[in-house]
Amino acid sequence: MRVLFVASGLGLGGAERQIVLLSRELERLGHCVSIYTLTRDTPRMDELAGTRVEVTVDSKRLRLDPAVLLRLRRHIRAWRPDVVHGFLYDGDIYSRIAACGTRLPVLNSERNDNYELSRAQLVGYRLTALLCDGIVANSHAGARFAQRVHPLLQQEIHVVWNGIDLAEVDARLKRAPKPPVQIFPQADVKRLCMVGAIKPQKDYLLALRVMRQLVDQDASWRLVCVGDALSNGSQGYKARVLAERDRLQLEPFVKFVGTRRDVLEIMAASDLVLVTSLHEGFPNVLLEAMASGTAVVSTDYSDVRLILPADQVVGSRREGDLADAVVRCYARRAEVASAQRRWVERHASASTSAPAMVEAYARYVAPFVVALQEPR
């Protein structure tokens, strides 16, 4: 099968990480993969080194750039994929329009849950609704959200959970230093880690209130926050978060280390990972923490209750409840970490997610391939 992914870029976000992992695993299974990026934001390009995955980097100058649409359409006709799969909003819209009239199946992705689309985004989806054949969501919660956003595709929405390359995780951690020890070099401290862009969806304000509760009980707690505000719209929220840290007098206990490439190593060397998200798709951070052998405490969102045991998921958003869950989980963190790793091995490795994606593609590819077999 020949699969073309269309995405804004290959940045450091979770969706881009999944594109890379999925591309590598599809190639390993004998499929051909091409990635077309709409911007030059491609820091993950090096993660495809040594593979035969083809990457075409473009650079759109407008939100909907006719020149890029034309170049993408030419690429589709020249590379002749069996399926075109868009990721995130720009990838969805560009793949729909560029593949129009090619008789190729076009799939889009839903990587989040219960977020607010702008009026322009809703109009874009409505105007191009008939150009999309199906949606692949990475969570059951995201699939339910996609049913509301894409009412014409009710029966063509599929769930394929994210996967992780366990061999790569193990190889990285085997040779890794311990970044949290460098960030908080004091002896006898309990290191908590939080990973995610600094934006309201991640609810850093709640995480800081949890830390205040923990420090009031035990001054040995420390929090490493990995991530940054990724857009101008998030700068105001970041300022609120930093102001709240100062108001709660947490500066000695909480460090913001910005965007990092060693996120996995930071989580692996932490005692616990804390997730306070309000909503999102399949939680990549959760998956990476579980694979790296670090116990997780999370708020209740997306498919988290299908992944973690009930005592690690806090249904309320009260800082006291989360702090209590952190303390309980810390006491049995080794046992928890082992159980989490076994779950990932059974349910969320790259070797399970890629075949599930191929199965979703096959629902659309087979009839199109038969119809086009003669010309090809």
Image (spheres, rainbow, N blue to C red):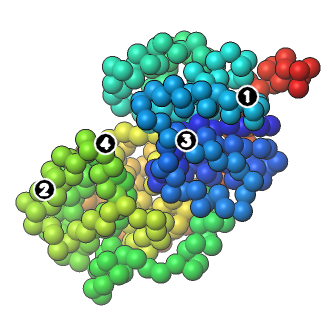
Closer to us: mark 4 or mark 1? 1
- Quadrant of residue 247 in the image? bottom left
Q: Are marks 4 and 1 in contact (CB under 8 Å)?
A: no
Query: Given the image, on which type of amino acid does mark 4 rest?
Result: Gln
On screen, residue 90 versus residue 250, left or right, reads right
Q: Are marks 4 and 3 in contact (CB under 8 Å)?
A: no
Q: Residues within 10 Å of mark 1 (few under 14, many from 20)?
A: few
Label 1 to label 2, Cα distance in Å? 53 Å
Q: Residues within 10 Å of mark 4 (few under 14, many from 20)?
A: some
Q: Are marks 1 and 2 in contact (CB under 8 Å)?
A: no
Label 4 to label 1, Cα distance in Å? 39 Å
SS class of the residue under badge 4?
Answer: helix
Residue 118: x %, y % from top left: 33, 24
Closer to the chain start, of discs 2 and 4, is 4
Closer to the chain start, of discs 4 and 3, is 3
Q: Which residue is mark 4?
A: 201
Label 2 to label 4, Cα distance in Å? 16 Å
Farthest residue toward the right? 374
Query: Given the image, on which type of amino acid does mark 3 rest?
Result: Asp
Q: Is residue 343 above or below residue 77?
A: below
The residue shown at (83%, 24%) is 369
Closer to the chain start, of discs 1 and 2, is 1
Label 4 to label 3, Cα distance in Å? 30 Å
Closer to the chain start, of discs 2 and 3, is 3
Q: Which residue is mark 1?
A: 77
Q: Is residue 223 visible?
A: yes
SS class of the residue under badge 1?
Answer: helix
Residue 298: x %, y % from top left: 37, 52
Q: Residues within 10 Å of mark 3 (few under 14, many from 20)?
A: some
Residue 283: x %, y % from top left: 46, 47
> Which numbered circle lies on residue 33?
none
